[in-house]
Amino acid sequence: MTLDRTSLAAQVRPTREALARARHAPPQIYADPSFLALEKEKIFLRDWLFVARIEELEKPGDFLTLRILGEPVLLTCDKVGKRRAFANVCRHRGVEVAQGSGHAERFSCPYHGWVYGLDGGLLGAPLMDGNQAFDAASCRLPELALEDWGGNLFLCFTPEPVPFASFIAPFQAEFGLLHQERCRLASKIPIELDCNWKFAVENLLDIYHVRVLHTKTFGAQFAADAKAINLRPGGIVTYFYQAGAPVPDGKSLFGRMDWIAERGDDFACTARLPPNTHLFGRCDSVRYLVIWPTAVDRCRIDCYHLFPAERFALPDFAARNQVYRDFQITVLEEDRPMVVSLQQAMGSRHYRPGPMAGLEATIHHVLNDYLDRIGL
C-alpha cells in the first residue's frame, strides 16, 4: 500500500498542535503495515538499538541471535573476548548460520556447510574450489557496529552511524550515577503483546493511567509531577522522581546500591532512549524494557533486571530476584488488556483520536518526534 502523504499530513495536523490543543494520532500509524516498513527504513535501520547485556556474551564462544524487523543478527564473543555483531546471513545463499543462543567454537551453515569463525571470517566452503570467482577472504559475515555503555550493548545497522559517544553522552550525564557497569543481569523476561510497538512505548511513558490501572500494584505509591519531566530533542524523555522499589510493598529486598545510598529509598528515575528502549532506575536496581516490533499489530518487550554484582553472592538471591520478576510480570499483565484494546480500537469505524491530557505531554513529545522521523 502506498501512503497518501497529503491526506496523512492533514490527519496528523491535530497531533502537531501544542499540547493544550492536541489530539492523539490517527489509527493508520498503528494499523497500516506500510508504516512498519517505513519505520524499519527511517528508524530501526538508522538508530542505535539496545540488543543485549554483556553477561549474555560473557565468555569467548558465547553467542545469541535475534531478528529485528526481519533482519537476522548474530552477536558473538570472539576468541579474544571482543563482543561483535554480524548479519546472520550466509554469504552463499543467505541461510542463518546460527540459531538461538549458546556456546560455539564456530558456526556452520545448516544448508551447504559453509563454516564461519567467531570473528565472522569464512573458515571453510565445501566443494567450492571449482568456482574461479570464489574468494574466501571476501566472504566474511557482514559486520555491524556494536558499542558498550555500562555493560549494555547497542547495535546500529547503518554503515555510518551517529557516533556512539555523541548518542550516549546525554544519558551518561544524567544516568551515569547508576553505575550499570557494576551491575549484572539477574533475569531477562520476554513478554509478547498483541499491539503495535508504539502503543507499548506510549504506555510506558503514560503517567496518566498509573493511578487508575495500577492501583493494586505500584499506582498508590506513585507520585507524578509532570513539571519535573524533561522532554529532550529527538524524542528523549528523562525523569527523576520518588517511588518505592519494584516489589509489591515498595520496600527493597536488597537495600540501596552503594553508589546512590545518599539518595534515599524512594530514589527513582526513568528515561526513554529512542526508539524503543526504556530505562528504570530505583534505589536497589536498574531495569530496561526494550520493545521490538514483530508485526504491525504485535510486539515483544524484553525486560532486563540488573542488580549490583555483589548481591548475587547472597544465599537467597534467587528467591529475592523471583519477587522482582513476578512483580514486573504482574504490572505488565495489568497493561496487557489495555494495549490490546487500544489496538482493536484502531479498526473501529467509531474511533476518532481524542484530546490529549496535560499528563500526556510525554506521548505528545514522542509522537511529534516520530512524525518528524517518518516525514509527516
Image: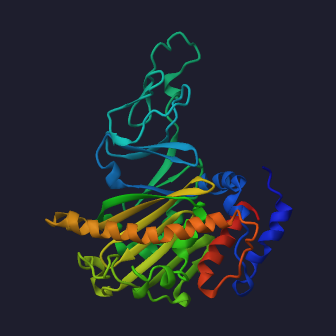
Q: Residue at x 60, y 65 (%)?
A: 198
Q: Position of residue 275 (x, y in %)?
A: 57, 63
225 vs 247, left or right, is right
User: Dividing the picture into quarters, in which one does residue 296 lie?
Assistant: bottom right
Residue closest to the eye, 70 or 213: 213
Please give the count of numbered marks on the rendered protein.
0
Residue closest to the eye, 355 or 368: 355
Q: Residue furthest right?
A: 6
Q: Is residue 122 visible?
A: yes
Q: Position of residue 279 (x, y in %)?
A: 45, 70
323 vs 20, left or right, is left
Q: Is residue 322 above or below residue 158?
A: below
Q: Residue at x 45, y 83 (%)?
A: 240
Q: Position of residue 183 (x, y in %)?
A: 30, 65
State the quadrant of the C terminus: bottom right
User: Dividing the picture into quarters, in which one does residue 283 lie?
Assistant: bottom left
Residue closest to the eye, 315 or 49: 315
Q: Residue at x 53, y 64 (%)?
A: 167
Q: Is residue 170 visible?
A: no
Residue closest to the eye, 251 or 161: 251
Q: Residue furthest top?
A: 130
Q: Position of residue 373 (x, y in %)?
A: 69, 63
User: Dividing the picture into quarters, in which one does residue 84 lie?
Assistant: top left
22 vs 299, left or right, is right
Q: Is residue 166 above or below residue 113?
A: below
Q: Residue at x 68, y 51 (%)?
A: 37
